[in-house]
Image: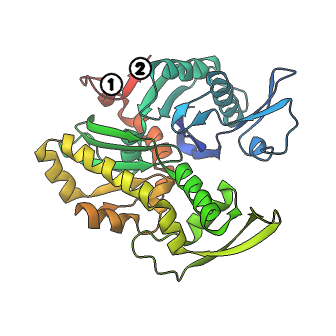
Amino acid sequence: MDIGIDLGTTNVLITMGNKGLVLNEPSIIAYDKRKEAVIAVGNEAHRMVGRAPDYIAVVHPLKDGVISDYKMTKEMIAAFIGKVTGQQLLMPSIIMCIPSSTTDVESRAVIEAAKNAGARRVYLIEEPVAALLGAGVDVSRPDGNMVVDIGGGTTDIAVISVNGVVAKSSVKLAGNKMDRAIAKYISGRYRVLIGERSAEMAKTAIANIYNPDGSRKYIVKGRHLVRGLPESLEINDYDIYEAIIDCVEEIIAGIKAVFEKTPPELVGDVFANGIYLTGGGALLSGLDKLIKLRLGVKCNIPEDPVTCVAKGTRAAFDCLDKLLEGFEHIPLLKY
């Protein structure tokens, strides 16, 4: 009954014992304000976005990598745990992965939610450590490895060696901000208003941030800002490039900043081992090539980068004693 939870801005992923990944649903909760009760979480709540009456609050309790609503976060965590265990908890141990920018107060709120759901013990692990574990990297060796975890709300960058984080940074920029940038670009250039979901689908389908040439095309649908009528518009990969290149350059600047804080011996290790790209942003076409061009370091993309953090929470159970003993700065804390 050991449970690993990746508490992401966009999605919550849960692993359980030997079953592996058992849940991957949006980080959304629907709450009835009149009855003060949770109506739905995850996929069910996602279907209510923009369609619920006023007395039902459909909330994203995590925004840009931080907990924006403590109460709803606690309710959502408890509901997801109940969903995967069938409401029959056998006092499990839970390792919960949280954004590295989460404050102590927010961490306590998360722990309290897990405790209220019946957890026997609760551990917290930062995303970069979990991401490397999920990618199959042995973090116990005296060998520097860099991970860049590009999620929905934040990009976490860290160099890890001997079970500890040597240097790290968190950039308040990731997939969601790129989607907003695409929607803003389309609105400004073509006078067509599209939603962030449409922008995300276009990004996934045709993005090429290394060498866009306009050959990849995609049709988006929205509302013309002048006429006020439905509009269908064909965009290409160069449009996506123009919209998000500033976001990507900011992530690359964050990687460079971490290099500047890293001891030279470990920088040499990272140069030899390469940078591990995880999270949904790792699937952005051409990102690995652009990083190699800008920084001169190769990139490694795991087989399934989206689930690396969730797999890492499960893998952390196998090395719990090593992570907990003898390291002052290890980002796995027991409460």
Query: Is residue 205 rendered to the left or right of residue 228?
Result: left
* Amino acid, disc 2: Lys
Residue 2 visible in the current orientation: no
Query: Is residue 253 rendered to the left or right of residue 130?
Result: left
Quarter containing the N terminus: top right
Point out the tag, 1 or 2, that comes first from the N-terminus.
Answer: 1
Q: Spatial distance from mark 1 to mark 2, Cα to Cα?
A: 8 Å
Residue 270 visible in the current orientation: yes
Q: How is the image coloured?
A: rainbow
Give the x, y percent position of residue 290: 34, 66
Give the residue at mark 1. Answer: 324
Give the x, y percent position of residue 210: 39, 71
Give the x, y percent position of residue 138: 29, 46
User: In this rendering, is residue 148 above or below 61?
Assistant: below
Residue 223: which quarter of the image? bottom right
Contact? badges 1 and 2 (CB < 8 Å): yes
Q: Pointer 1: residues within 10 angstroms few (<14), some, or many (20+)? A: some
User: In this rendering, is residue 197 above or below 292?
Assistant: above
Residue 326: which quarter of the image? top left
Judging depth in this view, the residue of 223 and 168 nearest the camera is 223
Give the residue at mark 2. Answer: 334
The label shown at residue 83 is: none
Secondary structure type for disc 2: strand
Secondary structure type for disc 1: helix
